[in-house]
Amino acid sequence: MRRPRPHLLLAAGAVLCAAIAANLWALRVPLRLDFTRHGVFSLGPETERALAELDRPLRITFFYDLGDQRHRDALALLRRYERASPWVSVRAHDPDLEPGVARTMGVRFAGEAVFEAAGAPVRVRGGDEQAFTNGLLRASRGAGRVVCFSAGHGESDPASHASHDHFETAETPGHDHSGAG
């Protein structure tokens, strides 16, 4: 029986050490290469532009079901946002395992994300890049909800305490809401 040659064992050990070192380096360096034809694992130019324009911290809280492949893909997409901008931080929670966190943020279903920058939180349903980038833009620009009041076509005056639970027609002109008539 032949004994293994020491220089072959030394060479095999060196190759093994190099492979381990390369794997450790790859885990620490956020370099990702996307060789797919349509850039499936890359962010689109609009998203990259929106992330480059961020000038304040943006926290994204994503509620997911680990058993759902769409949610895992959406979380991986949000992690790409996080790697692309130092302003973005992503937290992920399972609403079934952490219902208190979901309740606090007003989330009822897995697959929802809450974007918080300045102002009111922006909730996003759906896990595609377009929905997430729109949420990022709305949250970072402080675009909250707008409430409009209208008058002139039978709408109640928001400053009035009178009850308008009926229709005013031509048959009831000039009546008042004071209770006198």
Image (cartoon, rainbow, N blue to C red):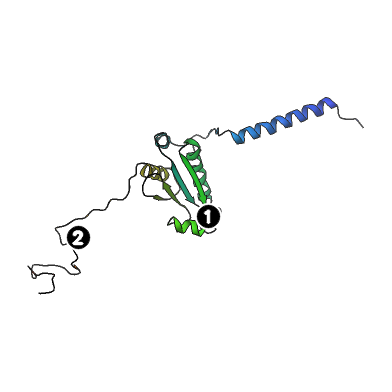
Residue annotated with mark 2: 159
Left or right of 34? Residue 116 is left
Left or right of 168? Residue 85 is right
Q: Is residue 4 visible to us here?
A: yes
Q: Position of residue 68 (x, y in %)?
A: 53, 53
Q: Is residue 174 above or below residue 56?
A: below
Of the 4 image quadrants, the one containing the N terminus is top right
Residue at position x 19%, y 55% from top? 150
Left or right of 17? Residue 92 is left
Q: Position of residue 46 (x, y in %)?
A: 39, 36
Residue annotated with mark 1: 94
Q: Residue furthest bottom?
A: 180
In front of the other: label 1 or label 2? 2
**Of the residues shown, which amino acid type is indicated by label 2?**
Ala
Left or right of 62? Residue 14 is right
Cα gap from disc 1 to disc 2, whole angstroms = 43 Å
**Of the residues shown, which amino acid type is indicated by label 1?**
Asp
The disc placed on residue 71 is none
Of the 4 image quadrants, the one containing the C terminus is bottom left
- Which sits in the foreground, 169 or 52? 52
Q: Position of residue 69 (x, y in %)?
A: 53, 50
Residue at position x 41%, y 39% from top? 56
Mark 2 secondary-structure assignment: loop
Residue at position x 11%, y 67% from top? 169
Q: Is residue 38 visible to us here?
A: no
Q: Is residue 159 above or below residue 181?
A: above
